[in-house]
Amino acid sequence: MTMTTWLDLSDDDLFGVDNLPYGVFSRVGEAPRVGVRVGDLVLDVSAVAALGDVGDGPDLASVWRQSTLNAFLAQGRSTWQIARAWLTEILTDAVHRDGVSPHLYPLAEVALHLPLAVGDYVDFYASEHHARNVGRIFRPDSEPLTPNWKHLPIGYHGRSQTVVVSGTDIVRPCGQRKPPTAPAPVFGPSVRLDIEAELGFVVGGPATDLGSPVSLADADEHFFGVVLLNDWSARDIQAWEYVPLGPFLGKSFATSISPWVVTMEALRAARVPLPGQDTPPLLPYLRGEPTTDGANTAYGLDISYEVDWNGTVVSRPEYRDMYWSPAQMLAHTTVNGATTRPGDLFGSGTISGPTRESRGSFLELSWSGAEPVGLDDGTERTFLEDGDVVTLRASAPGVSGRRIGLGECVGRILPARP
């Protein structure tokens, strides 16, 4: 169903009224607060909600006046749905124009902030194509997939304090690394700095109790929305440290996310079946089941990415190629009784496909440096150099049949600090 608005938006605007992503913005001299993007405008939702008629439920004007989305995330799915219905009404019914218009600000005139205070950050390894490529690169004489890979979604706990908003410069990390020809490790700046194009899942709803797992069937009650996520990775530091406990300093220096959280409701039309998980059979807690609307509790998402390196699009990964679903990630995270709370963030792991043009990391794209990537300015790259800028973009089918945007996630590399 096509939704029309009294705003002057083109039919192909990626931020039309079937999107309505949430973020946190501020104007000069004013405190940060929650906003919703419509076209190239930001709606101050707390100011409009203060006018009344939001419907039954919590005082959303107060909730949206906060400097993060966390208070809104904690309200739960029924409140999120009430808010979305209200936003849709005030932006499609011209009777609201006079009350709403004064609270719309041009995007170019506001500052965008980290949209949430990140609680626990877990990063997964959900792409079979990526896992096989990395296995071939790091363990060329072994089976690419580890024996557990198709039995459970593998992940590691990251560092939530170094999650930053798009546009934040990334300082080249230093650490231990062991060059292949060196007899002992050396210390210094990473020389194999990389990206990972990922999707981040923002958790909301009531905090769960210790010892109470979240089932696949209940996962939608806890997922609020998604952000673009770049898991910056120092491959030389990672390769030396990761055995036997996995990534540590090679990942924890920075993770970038986009400023706009696109809701799971806006992505309903983007749900697609997973590529197949019949062999080996999954244990029951990870096994998707049909739902009453003909879908499945374990689903993928049809989200198309672009990876831009200094102005050249070098890769176009598709999230629909991922093996593990977000619901399975949440079910596995909590199956041992671990808790979740509003503001937790799940990274999907690198989104990679079956071709070179769909690889979501430069480790894969350059095949560990053996196959340089040509850029439109005539230069070649294998890993990131100081001054390089990486931009992730993505879009998905929306509920009205038009495409919706996830925005951009941008980071520029600065030299290592002495």
Image: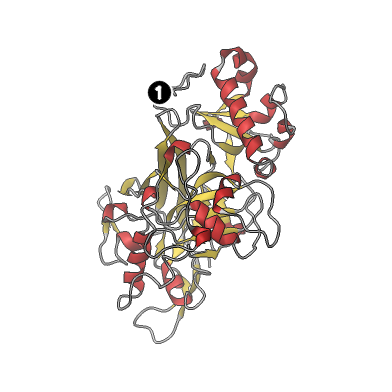
| Amino acid identity at mark 1 | Asp
Q: Depth check: 14 or 264 in front?
A: 264
Q: Depth check: 154 or 290 in front?
A: 290
Q: Position of residue 84 (x, y in %)?
A: 59, 30
Q: Which quarter of the picture shows residue 93?
A: top right
Q: Is residue 249 above or below residue 15?
A: below
What residue do we see at 46% from left, 59% from top?
232
**23 horizontally vs 294: left or right:** right
What residue do we see at 61% from left, 65% from top?
336
Q: Position of residue 149 (x, y in %)?
A: 42, 67
Q: Is residue 349 above or below residue 138?
A: above
**127 horizontally vs 264: left or right:** left
What residue do we see at 53% from left, 68% from top?
418
Q: Depth check: 376 or 220 in front?
A: 220
**Residue 26 can be seen, yes or no:** no
Q: Residues within 10 Å of mark 1 (few under 14, many from 20)?
A: few
Residue lying at the far bottom of the rendered structure:
183
Residue corresponding to mark 1 = 11
Q: Which quarter of the picture shows residue 363?
A: bottom left
Q: Position of residue 328 (x, y in %)?
A: 50, 56
Q: Which quarter of the picture shows residue 271?
A: top left
**Residue 345 can be seen, yes or no:** yes
Q: Position of residue 356 (x, y in %)?
A: 27, 56
